[in-house]
Amino acid sequence: MSTEAVHDEYYHDLSYREDLPLIPTREGVELYCESTGEGIAITTLNNFFFTAPFWRDYTDELVKHHRIVSYDLANHGHSTRLEREPTWEEHVEDLARLLDALEIDSTYLLASSASTQLARDMALAHPDRVRGLILAGPVVGPQIRRHRMLQRAWLQTLNSHDIPTLFAHMYPEFVSTQMIEEYRVPGYLGLRESFLAMSTPEELNNGLALAQQGDPSSELLTRIQAPTLIALGDDDILLGPTAGHELAALFPKGRCVIMPKAGHVPFLDEPVAFQEITRKFIEEVEANA
């Protein structure tokens, strides 16, 4: 397959919309944000490896029914660069003020991997602002320690080598067996190109370091009153199906859906199926509200 074909089939449009004004949140902080569609809002939360434009290809069905809000965290992407990485509490404050600026009273939060910590903390700090949680490949609860061990290994690889080597390290850990078999070398190269385009070494260092912090207590999950959907690939190396259902049971209104042959980021494997699962979850929650 030619380089051009690889780009066309696997590479995402990660370009920024230069016509969008940055949105002020905390003092000295402005966030890049894309808001499209109408209806009940779904706000995506980046996991330090994604940027706001990344979500376009994974919300293209949801945007037909909902308002999709995607933004870059402070110190990442096109948002304000700070001298130090914000804390989880500051990221929560940014999110609350972003919703204020967009005149969104409450929203569903769609998070994956490390950003599920941000979703958890937002639901605890501002329960009235969160209609529900969709946690894809979550790293909250008992498995957070295992994930932090992996993150430390990723950090060591990044600091000892470079981003392409980090991607080679991470790829078989977050991508499913089926995806590896189907994508082969062209898909690997296309995803690597996207990965390199979304982050700098400094951003990855800051994000992975922050992901090591925060309260790991599973007890926090028992306080969350928002309906919670855990979308879990059965090929997620961090969390098996049995543990996924046990994790969902910690949430007062939790449930777990297992996506066959999907990996740690299940919407990478099955974007249409993931969006349909999300749409049906929201539809059911709203019907019972």
Image (cartoon, rainbow, N blue to C red):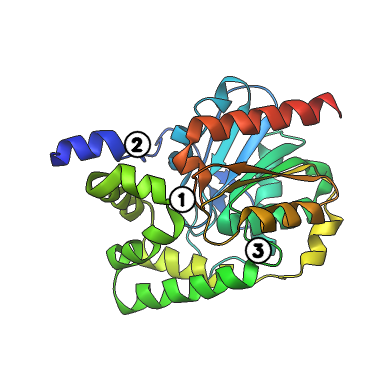
Who's the residue at 52% across and 45% down the image? 266
**Marked residue nearer the N-terminal end (3 or 2):** 2
Query: Is 112 or 86 nearer to us in this picture?
Result: 112
**Marked residue nearer the N-terminal end (1 or 2):** 2
Q: How crowded is mark 1: few (under 14 residues within 10 Å), some or many (20 or more)?
A: many
* Disc 2 target residue: 13
Residue 39, horizontal then vertical, whole percent = 68, 22
Who's the residue at 80% across and 63% down the image? 220
The answer to whether residue 177 is seen in the rendering is: yes
Who's the residue at 53% across and 25% down the image? 61
Residue furthest left as drawn: 2
Residue 15, horizontal then vertical, whole percent = 35, 39
Query: Is 208 or 233 nearer to us in this picture?
Result: 233
* Disc 1 target residue: 50
Q: SS of the residue at dot 2?
A: loop
- Find the distance from the CA under tag 1 to the CA under tag 3: 17 Å
Give the tally of numbered discs. Answer: 3
Query: Pointers 1 and 2 in contact (CB under 8 A)?
Result: no
- Find the distance from the CA under tag 1 to the CA under tag 2: 12 Å
Nearer to us: label 1 or label 3: 1
Q: Along the horizontal axis of the image, is 46 left or right of 256?
A: left
Quarter where residue 143 is shown: bottom right
* Disc 3 target residue: 88
Query: Is 81 or 156 nearer to us in this picture?
Result: 156
| Amino acid at pointer 1 | Phe
Quarter where residue 125 is shown: bottom right
Q: Quadrant of the C terminus?
A: top right
| Amino acid at pointer 2 | Asp
| Amino acid at pointer 3 | Trp
Who's the residue at 52% across and 60% down the image? 237
Query: Is 82 or 258 nearer to us in this picture?
Result: 258
